[in-house]
Amino acid sequence: MKALRRFTVRAHLPQPLAALERLSINLRWSWDKPTQDLFQTIDPELWKLVGADPVAMLGHVSPERLEELAHDEHFVARLAALAADLDDYLSRPLWYQQLAQVNDADSGAAPVLPNGIAYFSMEFGVAEVLPNYSGGLGILAGDHLKSASDLGLPLIAVGLHYRSGYFRQSLTADGWQHENYPLLDPQGLPLRLLTDAGGETVLVSLVLPDSAELFARVWIAQVGRIPLLLLDSDIPENDHQLRSVTDRLYGGDQEHRIRQELLAGIGGVRAIRAFTQIEGLAAPEVFHMNEGHAGFLGAERIRELIEAGLDFDTALTVVRSSTVFTTHTPVPAGIDRFPVDMVARYFGADPGGSSSRLLPGVPVERILAFGAEDDPTKFNMAHMGLRLAQRANGVSLLHGRVSREMFNNLWPGFDPAEVPIGSITNGVHAPTWAAPQWLELGRELLGTQDLSSLQEPETWGRLHEVDPGHLWWIRSQLREALVHDVRDRVRRSWLERGAADAELKWIATAFDPNVLTIGFARRVPTYKRLTLMLRDPERLRRLLLDPERPVQLIVAGKSHPADEGGKALIQQVVRFADQADVRHRIAFLPDYDMSMARTLYHGCDVWLNNPLRPLEACGTSGMKSALNGGLNLSIRDGWWDEWYDGENGWEIPTADGLADENRRDDLEAAALYDLLERAVAPKFYDRDERGVPTRWVEMVRHTLQVLGPKVLASRMVQDYTERYYLPAARALRQSIEPGVETEGPFGAARELALYRQKVHKAWPNVRVVEVDSYGLPDTPLLGSELTLTARVCLEDLRPDEVTVQAVLGRVDTGDALVNPVTIPMTHSGKTDAGEDLFTASTPLPVTGPVGYTVRVLPHHRLLAGDNELGLVTLAG
Ligand SMILES: *Cc1c(COP(=O)(O)O)cnc(C)c1O
């Protein structure tokens, strides 16, 4: 008989072991090896069985064993030390606390530190026991939280709790992906329920069309210092259909998805309000959207401010000042969009009214305007993110560039280079992803347990002292552990696909701890080109079976359940790997998750990445490999475009100008085979008298030294803090203050809102009437002084409400300015006709064909930049 529902009943912990509860619930254990070791000691066999999950461990261990450990002085002492270490980790001043003491280099003033940052994401990959992620976006969010914890940031994260998380993948006999959705029992997870002072479960609720109401409870996962709030609609207060709003990550149709995003965004803000009030915490000042999915949070914050007495535009100004939006999508097709009608229905007004039923006081039209795009029938979540956030960024230098082009139409009149979208290159959490052997070596070299100096290049410089033989020994150990794990997984997969044990003897010797090992593991959207390696199957076969310099390939990845094309790619790899002559050298491992990923990053010598450039916004798996001395073999895309230096791996030349995709794949695959054959394998197998590939090891050392300090999530979170969170907090506090002319709280925001209205009204009539130049000799020389005077019609804007700029530089054959310099022009009077005069003098900055123009932009002290509003008027 099958049970309808399952839950976990835990044994009582004897008093001397009480701290085990705390250690199991705080997910810090997931990056703290000593804590993992302690749980393993409880029962090493059981530890394996429960998948290295402390909460499950405490749910399964026998009361007798616990009694025994309670009398084991050594165990109790270890437990006490680790509990003390956790308390210390949770309370000691860290980087963020020290920031308050460092005055700003320019202004000399103390920095404005936000007293809370809310971080929203649809997925969080914190640990494999909490399968709340599908791929890179979620893992990145998890690493963001862990590093925020390590740095002491007052961050609160918000997402959804999915009844089944993301699917588990298995293969059918003929290599087709099969999806399982195991139900997660929240009681068996490291979660606690948000309850009020009276112990009652806190519910947040949203009004839906047809007077339905969606309720959600709030689970809290504790990630070191960081609370992660997860909203869960699977409760009796909801009718059957609404219970399943949070059933799965990325499952269902658009109707399902918009409900998830409304819950995450609007419900998320409400959950934060309840949480901070109950815990006595400050309300967060900065709101960070990790991708546009939770963008409705801005609309909810506007509602709150309107309820507090602000008008819509002032509320929007305040929300914008304190919102940060990160885009991860390099192609328009990847953007989350809903039918406008659907959004209108959810935010709809009661008959005869104009204010939203879901967000009372907020005009529906204004909400719809946030998501407007070229197609009038679509509501674009990325556009909403950009319109609700004064600060936005992409996730690598290249992706920043791509994003500025992609969203250029929101800032018409500007060259892509001036579109106000910056970039912060992603990073990965070292204690989570680096093998314990490397962390141990680091602690030895530094002579301390404290690894907070990992961002300093000098720290990694210490590797200089280490004998190549020792580095090679670590790499070899990790490769060997991987080979054992691969054999286990290959065996389980064959059995699952219907093979009999007796036919699987070959697996015991499949894969070789001494063979050059290449990893390729990632989700399977088309652009990542899982099967590029199969472009010329015979050539791949020769590489795998080379008698002197063979390679072995480990492949893994999940395809989105609705993506039949992706499943066909997986099947192609599985069928190739099934062949008897190569199956000991290539395998597709089903069910890629964090624990498999770790073993792969630890053990692979080479990490292969061959996306269609520039579709990989950043990519992080190669960073995790690099942290373990893996060498990247990759198309110059995402982070690798930025940090490849010629010696830390290999670049697969891209043919990304080619229109013919087939030819592009042919060329890039051929380049890949050539590199493997002529550069990678020869170096790996070139050994000294001790059997050490010294040239290879020097590349490993170089990789660790140059990439180690850069690829860290702690570097990333510090960058976000300094370049986004602090400026956003400063902007918020400025907007809350009285204005120059408007008294009372929010006066400044009110002024900026009025200014925006005034500018938008005046702009169609703002003109550069004429530009005159003076002073140039007949034959201008580099450095000759040029004086420009512009007559400008400002409509009813004051001269100090705009910036007028001379733009000067070399011109191409079409007279377009190339990398020009901009020179501010000063107001120098008025003409009789009432036009304003602006002048500037400047030495000619470059030789060759030079041109100039003059332009007018809005200017206000509370704008993040003169380009923020997307308005510009050019001369002529
Ligand atoms: C790092 C990671 C990813 C992301 O890898 P990409 O290189 O960005 O594709 C996906 N899944 C898991 C389990 C990971 O650990």
Image: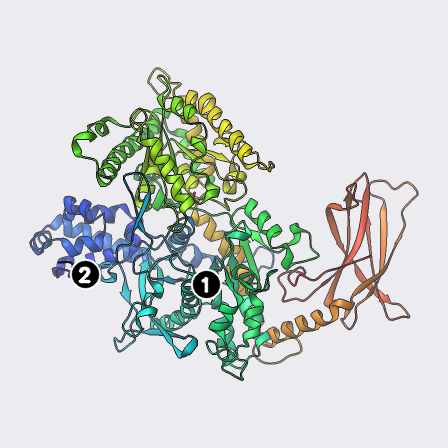
Foreground: disc 2 or disc 1: 2
- Using the numbered discs, state the Cα–Cα distance from disc 2 to disc 1 in whole angstroms: 31 Å
Residue drawn at x 49%, y 30% is 669
Name the amino acid, label 2. Arg
Eyeballing the image, is 180 above or below 833?
above
Closer to the camera in the image, 492 or 309: 492
Tell me the residue at 50%/29% (across/down): 647
Mark 2 neighbour density, 10 Å: few (under 14) some (14–19) many (20 or more):
few
Q: Residue beneath label 2, please? A: 6
- Quickly name the residue at label 1: 294
Give the x, y percent position of residue 63. 9, 56
Q: Quadrant of the N terminus?
A: bottom left
Q: Is residue 636 above or below residue 816?
A: above
Q: Residue furthest front?
A: 174
> On the rendering, which quadrant does ligand 1 occupy?
top left
Q: Mark 2 or mark 1, which has the lower sequence index?
A: 2
